[in-house]
Amino acid sequence: MQLNPYGEYAVLLAASLANEWPADRAGIEARTREFGMTMTFPEGPDDHARVSEVVQEWAAVVDAPPGAERAELLNEIMASAAAFPRLTDHDGEGWHLHYRDVGMSFAAVLRSVFAVGTALHLTTRGMHRLRRCAAGEAPGDPCANVVVDVTRNGRQRYCSVRCANRDAVRRHRARQASPGRT
């Protein structure tokens, strides 16, 4: 039996949706496939809007300070998304666990997966390893992307090399312009 803990891929999927919201339900489902979810989802007329609400709820966890406040928000989501873990064998994946009930809506499935995955990510890697891009902390910088730190050293601060370079140039120029510099 394979144990599928919904760890890293679930958090990366949530961040991907938060950073680049698909135009329609098909785009959301395509993104789930890109991140390894192979199951089919029941289709509902308001899936796009409901999944958007789930992603916004998850983003509140990202924006909460690491520690007790973040844990409390995530615990509330997990409590409301609670379902008994179930053994399943679909799509040739082999036996694994699902942390959701059968027949749940698309949004409810993603809510459960994001909550459990985020909890596993934060408890195994560290409560600080989920944040917004550090480039966006500078006045006027538009980046508000979510960064899921999966690095070995736990120091990822930027969503991309582009943002890291832009911030480095900004810091360099500020040092060059500081008074007393010769």
Image (spheres, rainbow, N blue to C red):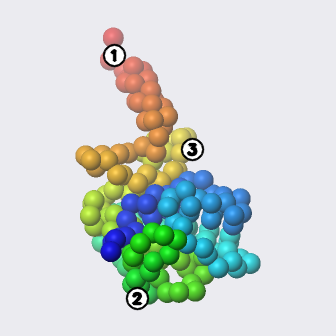
Disc 2 is placed on an element classified as loop
Disc 1 is placed on an element classified as loop
> Where residue 142 is drawn, which disc sits there?
3
Residue contact at pointers 2 and 3, CB within 8 angstroms: no
Identified by mark 3, the residue type is Pro
Position of the C terminus by quadrant: top left
Which residue appears farthest toward the top when viewing the image?
182
Q: Crowdedness of circle 1 by 10 Å Cα count: few (<14), some, many (20+)?
A: few
| Rendered image quadrant of residue 22 | bottom right
| Rendered image quadrant of residue 33 | bottom right
Instruction: Point out the frontmost of discs 1 and 2.
Output: 2
Q: Earlier in the sequence, mark 1 or mark 2?
A: 2
Q: Left or right of 12: which side holds 48?
A: right
Identified by mark 2, the residue type is Phe
Q: Is residue 107 among what the camera can see? A: yes
**x then y, percent, for residue 179:** 36, 20
Instruction: Point out the frontmost of discs 2 and 3.
Output: 2
- Mark 3 and mark 1: Cα distance apart in space: 29 Å
Q: Nearer the viewer, residue 87 or 161?
A: 87
* Residue depicted at x 52% and y 71%: 91
Q: Nearer the viewer, residue 145 or 21?
A: 21
Q: Earlier in the sequence, mark 3 or mark 1?
A: 3
Q: Is residue 137 among what the camera can see? A: no
Q: Crowdedness of circle 3 by 10 Å Cα count: few (<14), some, many (20+)?
A: few
> Where residue 181 is drawn, which disc sits there?
1
Q: Earlier in the sequence, mark 2 or mark 3?
A: 2
Residue 84 lies, with reference to residue 74, above or below; the image says below
**x then y, percent, for residue 97:** 39, 78
Residue 39 lies, with reference to residue 82, above or below; the image says above
Q: Nearer the viewer, residue 10 or 20?
A: 10
**Pointer 2 residue:** 84
**x then y, percent, for residue 54:** 56, 72
